[in-house]
């Protein structure tokens, strides 16, 4: 797994086995996506599928051109598909998206195969029409990816267990957000139960031995706000929480995903 970008300006991750390649979200342009793949030594001439978590532009703005370039199947929910078709800009890209023939509608709770990768989709609490998180299994290994959620319900925690790699949102520092430049209604949205996870919410999850199993070899904090967070602050908060665990200690490596620089690839 490689994280090509993660943040408010664009999100995209790449999963590969010897047989299958998947993109998760397409918040970068086709040119930038391919440039970042090249930076990590990946130059795929094909893609077996593109999965979309939700319709916000930082997760799908590059979808029409990337899907057309790879002539591959798009996996997303029907409500998300309708929202993208109505809202993606510019209109010429929306029309290209509507004409794309290879679309597979999925739903929360769905489990399906793309090549040799088993995909599990699950609902997450975010202010999008039908947002999803994903867990992936292949060759006895598991990766889980969940960003853009206001809190961690029990069913989400269930899907994050037993992961060798966990990519988890740590969007904002609450105090930085409160005194930051956003209008108050935006701050309320971010802090709501359909907004984004704070460093504090993530730390409470990481120190909870009944919630976080400490199994990941790689724990990636993702979707950090450029205005309301700092990589060092997020990392210190997570490290402090992991240090509070008394029984099942975390033995893996903590990473911070970047908006500007690809992270990985992680070999599972």
Image (cartoon, grey):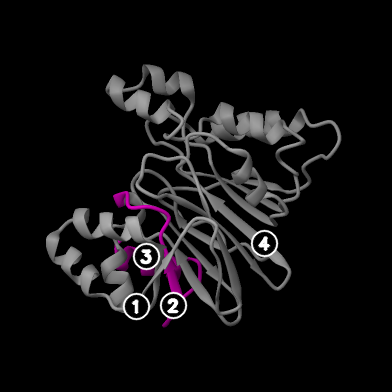
Q: Nearer the viewer, mark 3 or mark 1?
A: 1
Q: Which residues are magenta?
A: 29-57
Q: Nearer the viewer, mark 2 or mark 3?
A: 2
Q: Secondary structure at mark 2?
A: loop
Res. 142 mark: 4
Res. 227 mark: none
- Residue at image mark 3: 33
- Residue at image mark 1: 102
* Residue 39 colored in magenta in the image: yes
Position in image of residue 45 (x %, y %): 41, 82
- Residue at image mark 2: 47
Q: Secondary structure at mark 3?
A: helix
Alpha carbons under labels 3 and 1: distance apart = 21 Å
Q: Quadrant of the C terminus?
A: bottom right
Position in image of residue 126 (x %, y %): 42, 40
Alpha carbons under labels 4 and 3: distance apart = 24 Å
Is residue 182 among the parts visible in the rendering? no
Mark 1 is surrounded, within 10 Å at the Cα level, by few (under 14), some (14 to 19) or many (20 or more) other residues, namely few
* Of pointers 3 and 1, the one earlier in the residue sequence: 3
* Residue 61 colored in magenta in the image: no
Q: Residue at x 13, y 66 (%)?
A: 92
Q: Nearer the viewer, mark 4 or mark 1?
A: 1
């Amino acid at each position: 797994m490689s994280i090509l970008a993660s943040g408010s300006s664009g999100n995209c991750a790449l999963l590969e086995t010897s047989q299958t390649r998947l993109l998760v979200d397409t918040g970068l342009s086709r040119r930038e996506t391919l440039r970042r793949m090249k930076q990590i030594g990946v130059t795929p001439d094909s893609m077996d599928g593109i999965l979309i978590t939700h319709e916000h532009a930082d997760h799908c703005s590059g979808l029409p051109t990337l899907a057309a370039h790879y002539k591959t199947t798009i996996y997303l929910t029907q409500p998300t598909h309708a929202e993208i078709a109505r809202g993606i800009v510019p209109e010429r890209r929306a029309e290209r998206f509507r004409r794309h023939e290879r679309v597979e509608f999925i739903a929360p709770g769905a489990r399906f195969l793309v090549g040799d990768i088993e995909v599990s989709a699950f609902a997450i609490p975010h202010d999008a029409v039908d947002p999803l998180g994903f867990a992936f299994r292949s060759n006895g290994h598991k990766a889980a990816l969940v960003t853009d959620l206001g809190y961690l319900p029990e069913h989400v925690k269930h899907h994050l267990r037993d992961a060798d790699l966990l990519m988890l949102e740590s969007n904002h520092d609450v105090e930085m957000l409160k005194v930051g430049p956003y209008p108050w209604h935006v701050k309320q949205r971010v802090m709501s139960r359909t907004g984004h996870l704070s460093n504090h919410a993530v730390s409470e999850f990481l120190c909870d031995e009944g919630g976080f199993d400490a199994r990941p070899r790689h724990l990636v904090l993702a979707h950090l706000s450029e205005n309301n967070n700092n990589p060092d602050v997020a990392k210190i908060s997570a490290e402090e929480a992991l240090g509070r665990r008394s029984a099942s200690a975390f033995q893996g490596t903590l990473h911070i995903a970047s908006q500007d620089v690809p992270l990985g690839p992680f070999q599972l």
